[in-house]
Amino acid sequence: NAKEAEVPLASTFAMFEYDENNGRLNSTPAFFGTNVDAKIAVSHPHMFTVVNSKNAYMVDLGANRVNQFLVSINENNQLNVQTNPTAPVFIDSPLNSKVGPRHLSFHPSLPIAYLVHELNNTISVLKVDHGLNNALSLLQVVSMLPKGANISLNAAAEIQVSPDGKFVYASNR
């Protein structure tokens, strides 16, 4: 389970409270994170997104996974952050190849998320299971490149869903 970390953990995020009057951050963040499997050479959290008042996801390119966190406030008005106990960490790699998950974007009305992979220029379409605290499961993987393109000359970067949900935009460089 994620807990306030004795820094450094392999995959971490910092949460700052802010002053509602001027927007300034406090100088003492709370750190949360997960440990990385010893077989993984390096963790490289690339993106952190909060999708609602209870769920957050950290995309870790180096560890080849997406960590999901459940966020809540207890009766003492203290933040509680833990990994989702009903959802395994989503690893988008049936053969344990390094695909390099980079960015995650959620559809505005469907229980779907899109995950772009930097290292193999693919997009994973993921089901968001509301019955399992918004756990992710793989539905489809598609290439971002035309047939015959040299994968080593490209690296996927960003992914966004249009506000009306009709289009998914992904970039590579």
Image (spheres, grey):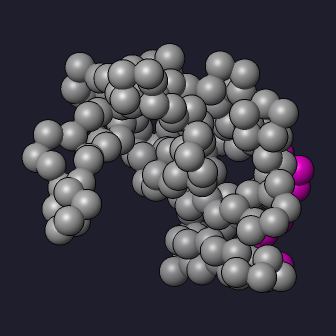
Q: Is residue 104 left or right of residue 41?
A: right
- Residue at the location (44% across, 21% down)? 75
- Residue at the location (20% across, 65% down)? 21
Q: Which of the pair 89/119 is nearer the observer?
A: 89
42 magenta-colored: no
The spot of residue 57 in percent (x, y) is 55, 45
Report if residue 126 is visible in the image: yes
Q: Which of the pair 84/99 is nearer the observer?
A: 84
Vertical placement of residue 113 versus 143, above or below: above
The spot of residue 118 in percent (x, y) is 56, 62
The spot of residue 81 in percent (x, y) is 46, 28
* Outermost right residue: 139
Give the mark count: 0
Vertical placement of residue 30 versus 156, above or below: above
- Residue at the location (74% across, 68% down)? 108
Q: Main secondary structure of the magenta part?
A: strand
- Residue at the location (52% across, 52% down)? 50
Magenta span: 137-147
Q: Quarter of the image holding residue 161?
A: bottom right
The spot of residue 94 in percent (x, y) is 78, 37
Vertical placement of residue 159 versus 129, above or below: below
Q: Is residue 15 left or right of residue 150?
A: left
Q: Quarter of the image holding residue 116?
A: bottom right
